[in-house]
Image (cartoon, rainbow, N blue to C red):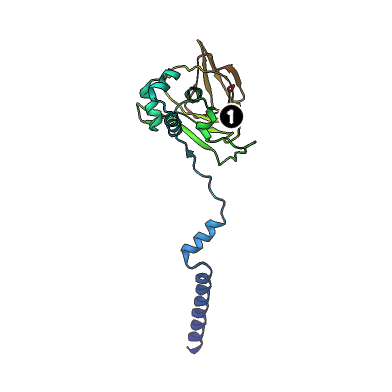
Amino acid sequence: MEEDKRRETVRDAEQDFLAEISNNQFGGRTEEQDFLESISPSSPKEDIQINVGERVKQVRKDRDLTLQDISQRTDLEVAFLEQIENGSVAPPLGTVIKLAKALDLKMGYFISGDEDRPFTIVRKNDGKVVSRYSSKKGKYYGYGYESLAPHKKDRHMEPFLVSLEPSESDEERSAHDGQEFIYVLEGAMEVRLGEEVYVLDPGDSIYYDSTVPHLVKNHGKDVTRILAVLYSEG
């Protein structure tokens, strides 16, 4: 009987000792979990949304220009310009080029802000995405594009990673100054150039003058990813 009591006392002491070590090391289960999470690989950062419209509005006001002035310079409707400035719709790249030309700036300013570096490096999880929305349906429908050359000064090329979402919306073709090169990474992409229509698969590419009325869209039910490089003079 005495021997059983002695063993029980030793066992209790051992449990108290182990519990004390655990509490001193981790401060309880919560801190232990925090410790384990702190040494685990961190998850990728979420995409950062950029409001192109805010920059357009600021530049326009700094130059004492009205929406009507911009409309006359770009042939874009005032109502559409208002939607861009208030952030209800993110403009497609062709529209950004038109706005940049109207305001005598490079399109990169509206995507990435000031250009002040001789070179730029973008890590895979550091991209800033501009997403396009339907102002009529109020939901995401077209594409999101990520600048691969933010802050590079005096650049004439604008490289982007573009995700084309499946969409039933049939948009108008756009035309603007410059040239475009596109390489398909994943999925299928439909290209409409003038009256011609082409479907490109992974590994395919296309190079064309942006002055030709064109439309690039998803072809299928899965997201399509492309590398797009836009060139404009000036």
Horizontal side of residue 141 vs 231, given as left or right: left
Horizontal side of residue 39 vs 68, given as left or right: right
Residue 108 in the image: above or below residue 125 = above
Residue 26 in the image: above or below residue 122 = below
Regarding mark 1 in the picture, which secondary structure is present there?
A: strand
The residue at the point 38 percent across, 32 percent down is: 86
- Camera-nearest residue between 16 and 213: 213
**Farthest-out residue, front:** 64
**Farthest-out residue, top:** 195
x, y percent for residue 224: 52, 28
The residue at the point 53 percent across, 72 percent down is: 21
The residue at the point 49 percent across, 79 percent down is: 12
Type of amino acid at the residue the image marks with label 1? Pro
Horizontal side of residue 156 vs 138, given as left or right: right
Q: Which residue is mark 1?
A: 159
Quarter of the image for the C terminus: give it.
top right
x, y percent for residue 110: 50, 31
x, y percent for residue 80: 38, 24
- Total marks placed: 1
- Camera-nearest residue between 89 and 52: 52
The image quadrant of residue 68 is top left
Query: Label 1 neighbourhood size at 10 Å, few (<14), some (14-19), many (20+)?
Result: many
The image quadrant of residue 153 is top right
Is residue 14 something one can see in this rendering?
A: yes
**Farthest-out residue, right:** 118
Is residue 134 something one can see in this rendering?
A: no
x, y percent for residue 75: 43, 17
